Image: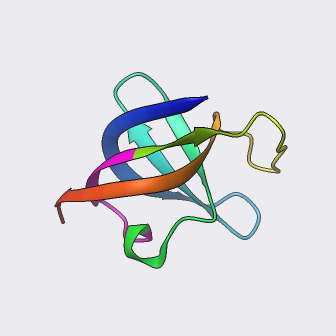
Amino acid sequence: MSIEAQGTITFQSFGLGVWALAASETTYELFEPPTELQQEGLAVKVTGNIRDDIMTVAMIGPVLEVKNFEILSS
């Protein structure tokens, strides 16, 4: 399922750590996020696909595979 979400990038320290997008309605766990998105506190708009076929150790929310993104502020 394709979605568009806007929020703030966070780093969650589960296991080796995981990057997430904290949006107003939910927190998405980012699947192999681009290096440009791996910055704590970055405000972004992201489009991508929810991956229902992937399980993770962190299990902090739906897994989002980023297709496109726009950095709103750092």
Residue 37 in the image, given as x and y percentages of width and height: 40, 67
Q: Colour scheme of this structure image?
A: rainbow
Left or right of 14 in this view: 74? left
Give me the residue at 46% from left, 78% from top.
Answer: 35
Give me the residue at 58% from left, 40% from top.
Answer: 49
| Of 16 and 2, the residue lying toward us | 2
Per the image, is 44 magenta? yes
Please identify the quarter of the rendering in which residue 73 is found: bottom left
Left or right of 28 in this view: 44? left
Per the image, is 65 magenta? no
Is residue 55 placed above or below 70 in the rendered structure? Answer: above
Is residue 57 placed above or below 35 in the rendered structure? Answer: above
Q: Quadrant of the N terminus?
A: top right
| Of 17 and 46, the residue lying toward us | 46
Outermost residue, left direction? Answer: 73
Residue 9 in the image, given as x and y percentages of width and height: 39, 55
Give me the residue at 65% from left, 65% from top.
Answer: 17
Outermost residue, bottom direction? Answer: 35
Left or right of 46 in this view: 50? right
Residue 74 in the image, given as x and y percentages of width and height: 18, 66
Give me the residue at 64% from left, 34% from top.
Answer: 62
Left or right of 16 in this view: 41? left
Q: Which residues are magenta?
A: 38-46
| Of 16 and 7, the residue lying toward us | 7
Number of callouts in the render?
0
